[in-house]
Image (spheres, rainbow, N blue to C red):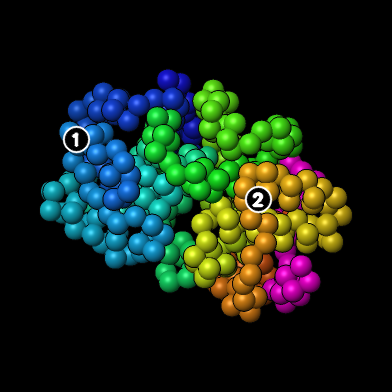
Amino acid sequence: MKTFKASFSSKTTTFWFNDSMLSLPARLKGERLIFVTDEQVFASHTRLFKNFETIVVPAGETHKHQGTVDRIVLQLIERKADRKSILVGVGGGVVTDMAGYAASVYMRGIRFGFVPTTILAMVDAAIGGKNGVDVGVYKNLVGTIRQPDFLLYDFALLKSLPHEQWVNGFAEVIKHAAIKDARMFSGLENTTVAKLKRDKTALASLIERNAKIKIRVVQADEFEVGERRLLNFGHTLGHAIENELALMHGHAIAVGMVYAAQISSWVKGFAQHSRLVTLLEQFELPTNARFDLDKALAVASMDKKREGNTMNFVLLNRLGNAVVHKIPIDDLAAWFRQV
Ligand code: GLY
């Protein structure tokens, strides 16, 4: 087990890497823990929840809405959770986003922490304090920014992760490499999902490296007025097609990254487009999708990255070096059409 502490504006979050979920009561001695998980995680790891108070919600992005958060809040009331209780979200990004949101609004805010169970949640979704729910096709339109007290990484939980979810998570790993870490990008070019599944040490160190990239970016700009926008690479189009086509998040942003890389080559002279496409393919991710461009543009126009008639769009100068570029929405539409 390795402890790492990261300070944000309102609190210091403790990261326990390479730990066991069952050590939580000892780590948080004397505290009342209430767990939130989804039906899939609960079914795969029922034994782990045996001695814990647990709220189980339906699994999947289609349940990431206010109604599910209301169910969590009602259960907290039924269980007489008070302001000292700690809510622990155990699951992928859908669970951690909703658990963080429910904890942020219940009694105007109780403490919470996460045990991420997917690669995607470990490297991205559970880190950063943004939580919330979708509203129809609009991803994460309602929520708060509030940091968790802790994240516990129990790599044994990955044993039950379906292969497609491994692939899904590596889209965010490739994104981190593309925007921030050219050396990690080269390292990824020499491996595959299958190799990482076998090599637990390499996997643990890759997850920790990615978690720390995300932590550093969030520390530099917690409320997303500058640097943090870089994490949205591939997400403008990605979010616009994700719910529309019922794609997995990683698949949607892989397609979004390919579009953004193509636009980067026109606007910034980015010359490594084919390396990005090849790496995405090597990690079994899609690099194109059939979608209705007008519908996608309509959804993108409600994106949180929009400011008036311009979009804060992330482009690459080169691998490992990204920049936020303000693009008029009309130009963006024209570029998407050309790609
Ligand atoms: N919860 C994801 C983030 O804060 O970016």
Cα gap from disc 2 to disc 1, whole angstroms: 41 Å
Q: Is residue 235 above or below residue 322?
A: below
Would you say the residues marked 2 and 1 are in contact, meaning their CB atoms lie under 8 Å apart?
no
Q: Amino acid at mark 1?
A: Lys
Q: Is residue 128 visible?
A: no
Few, some or many residues within 10 Å of mark 1 (<14, 14–19, 20+): few
Q: Residue at x 63, y 36 (%)?
A: 192
Q: Position of residue 169 (x, y in %)?
A: 53, 45
Few, some or many residues within 10 Å of mark 2 (<14, 14–19, 20+): many
Q: Is residue 69 magenta?
A: no
- Quadrant where the N terminus is found in the figure: top left
Front-lying residue, 191 or 237: 191
Q: Is residue 246 visible?
A: yes
Mark 2 or mark 1: which comes first in sequence?
1
> Along the horizontal axis of the image, is 283 left or right of 69?
right
> Along the horizontal axis of the image, is 267 left or right of 252?
right
Q: Which mark is residue 50?
A: 1
- The residue tagged 2 is 230
Magenta part of the protein: which range? 316-339
Q: Amino acid at mark 2?
A: Leu
Q: Residue at x 22, y 48 (%)?
A: 55
> Along the horizontal axis of the image, is 211 left or right of 227?
left
Q: Residue at x 24, y 39 (%)?
A: 46
> Along the horizontal axis of the image, is 94 left or right of 28?
right
Front-lying residue, 170 or 102: 170
Q: Position of residue 293 (x, y in %)?
A: 65, 75
Q: Residue at x 63, y 70 (%)?
A: 290
